[in-house]
Image (cartoon, rainbow, N blue to C red):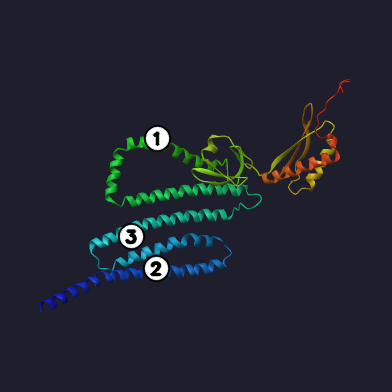
Amino acid sequence: MRSLVMEDIDMWDTLLSWKGWLWPVTVLSLAVVVALGCHFIIVHVLSHFARRSASKVDDVLLRHLRRPVRWIMVAVAFRLALDPLDLSEGVRNLALMVFGLTFIALIAWLLIKAVYILSDVATLRFQVDVKDNLRARKVHTQLRVLRQILVIVIVIIASASILMTFPKVRQLGTAILASAGIIGIVVGLAAQKTLATFIAGLQIAFTQPIRLDDVVIVEGEWGRIEEITLTYVVVRIWDLRRLIVPITYFIERPFQNWTRISADILGTVFLYVDHTVPTDAVRAELQRILEASESWDRKVCVLQVTNTSERTVELRALMSAADASLAWNLRCEVREKLVEFVRNNYPHALPRLRAELEKGECP
């Protein structure tokens, strides 16, 4: 009989323990489901209006805010559901601590997305895929560097806020501050290059010796600026290789920027021909070639004799184009057609080696 009573007591205790954790889990789960359902409805309604709107700003907002707002709503619903629950003090404190740490991380995520929103909205007005994109490339460069700086600042502040919620970390921070003199010297020596890189990134953003899509000559390589970060710059070389250059390079060393002020550029072609070449005929042929070419911008067309030697005359053809790529194609086209013109019409004007035989020297 006594064993039956003990079994009934154990069964009742088990049921009570089940009720003790089953009810809070059920309430919290329902709160999470309600938050996810509300988020789904709100996003569905806003997406419907965004599709009907001609503005791209609402699309940017939905794309960046959808995920952080979802989990913020879940966290807030979790926190509100804790109040009516009859939890022990230890469990409640643990749940509140987890909520606090998670909420700080979610707010940091939301702020980072807000930075991306501001960057994307600002760049909507400045398209780089147009012919005259100098101002657009300038704005894109500044916004990209500033965005990286703001993201780093937000991550540092959020990490510090999370760590300072632990009492032991606060005590460690006090001890570190007490020895700030020595640590400051060590950190300063160790972070010299990091600080120099950071400052170089700021200089690039505001003084802009380079911008995105600029045409540059770096380390003897011709390419375009593809990416600018706080620590390095990626140059896309003409043969699709990537040259990774420290960002301090563009502050400390000379380089060529072919699109610093404008994209238009002059191209040159050199011909080495015999002294008997009719210069006026070659000059007229150059004019005809350029007028028939789609790569010429109709600004500069010059043919000059720039040098002579005992064997040849150096002719320099000078022409202009809207950008470096067109100038390269134009130079190749002019070089090919001028050589063909001289070969077909004035073969005697091709470079030749002259020799004079004295009388009596013939075999």
In the rendered image, the quadrant that contains the C terminus is top right
Which residue is drawn at the image coordinates 50% and 67% (left, top)? Answer: 46
Please state which of residues 358 and 252 is positioned toward the viewer in this rendering: 358
Residue identified by numbered label 2: 35
Q: Circle 2 — which element?
A: helix
Q: Are marks 1 and 2 in contact (CB under 8 Å)?
A: no
State whether residue 205 appears in this view: no
Q: Are marks 3 and 1 in contact (CB under 8 Å)?
A: no
Residue identified by numbered label 1: 189
- The three-letter code of the residue at mark 2 reads Ala
Q: Earlier in the sequence, mark 1 or mark 2?
A: 2
Q: Circle 3 — which element?
A: helix
Residue at the farthest bottom position = 1
How far apart, in angstroms, are the residues tagged by discs 2 and 3?
15 Å
Q: Nearer the viewer, mark 1 or mark 2?
A: 1
- The three-letter code of the residue at mark 3 reads Phe
Q: Which mark is residue 99?
A: 3
Which picture quadrant has residue 218? top right
Left or right, residue 343 beside residue 125: right
State whether residue 11 appears in this view: yes
